Amino acid sequence: QKEVEQNSGPLSVPEGAIASLNCTYSDRGSQSFFWYRQYSGKSPELIMSIYSNGDKEDGRFTAQLNKASQYVSLLIRDSQPSDSATYLCAVNTGGNYQLIWGAGTKLIIKP
Amino acid sequence: EAGVAQSPRYKIIEKRQSVAFWCNPISGHATLYWYQQILGQGPKLLIQFQNNGVVDDSQLPKDRFSAERLKGVDSTLKIQPAKLEDSAVYLCASSFRDTEAFFGQGTRLTVV
């Protein structure tokens, strides 16, 4: 059974601080990794994709991938109240391009 | 580039009635996903198409749910008969191979 695990939270972070979200996956053959943000009542929206080990930065967001340890993380710098949402981790296990989803971490940024 | 289109946005039906949802993926995206999302949970895959073939429908309740993807483009998801526990948001997403999936706005279904 291929699984993706996330801490459900809520994770509470003060405004302006760094929010750190983590995700672990079970399938060592996984090739593609994605972070989505979902506001209440809205559809998931892609924030970051990462395909190789290391860090990938896009504005205030940094995705980190460690295939040896089978985890992927998302860092949000200078957190804003508008970052309050549920963050979903998704992993593509290759083969038939199947996406496995975590249950999401609820992030709350406190002003 | 147009996004994933879904309709309707909202639907209220009585239990035992039938309902259908429609999805038009992003042009050129061969992979199409239907998800069910219950409040507070991650998306649950119902069915995945690669072009017009089914890749994974292991979590589709086949006694009441059906889906098709005509000509490898548009897709329809049907529920017949609906149960109270089918109340959820139904999300359609598409992707190009193993790249990121893009979602439509979803259909919020309420079964009363």
Image (tube, coloured by chain):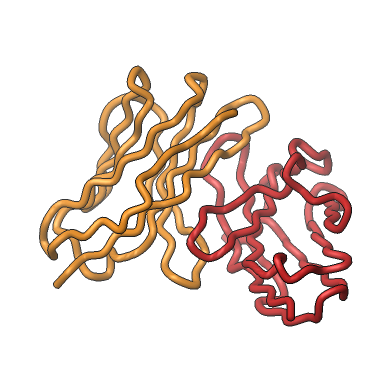
**Quadrant occupied by the N terminus of chain A:** top right
Query: Whole-percent x and y of residue B95?
Result: 61, 45
Query: Whole-percent x and y of residue A65?
Result: 32, 30
Chain coloured orange: A
Could you tell whether A74 is left or right of A2 in the image? left
Could you tell whether A98 is left or right of A46 in the image? right
Q: Residue at x 43, y 44 (%)?
A: A89
Can residue B26 be seen from the camera position used here? no
Occupied quadrant, residue A51: top left
Q: Residue at x 56, y 30 (%)?
A: A2
Q: Nearer the viewer, residue A53 or B107?
A: B107
Can residue B95 be seen from the camera position used here? yes
**Quadrant occupied by the C terminus of chain A:** bottom left
Occupied quadrant, residue B79: bottom right
Above or below — where is B112 with respect to A30? below
Occupied quadrant, residue A24: top left
Q: Residue at x 22, y 51 (%)?
A: A76
Chain coloured red: B
Could you tell whether B83 is left or right of A17 in the image? right
Q: Nearer the viewer, residue A8 or A62?
A: A8
Query: Whole-percent x and y of residue B87?
Result: 68, 70
Query: Whole-percent x and y of residue A7?
Result: 35, 46
Q: Residue at x 26, y 56 (%)?
A: A11
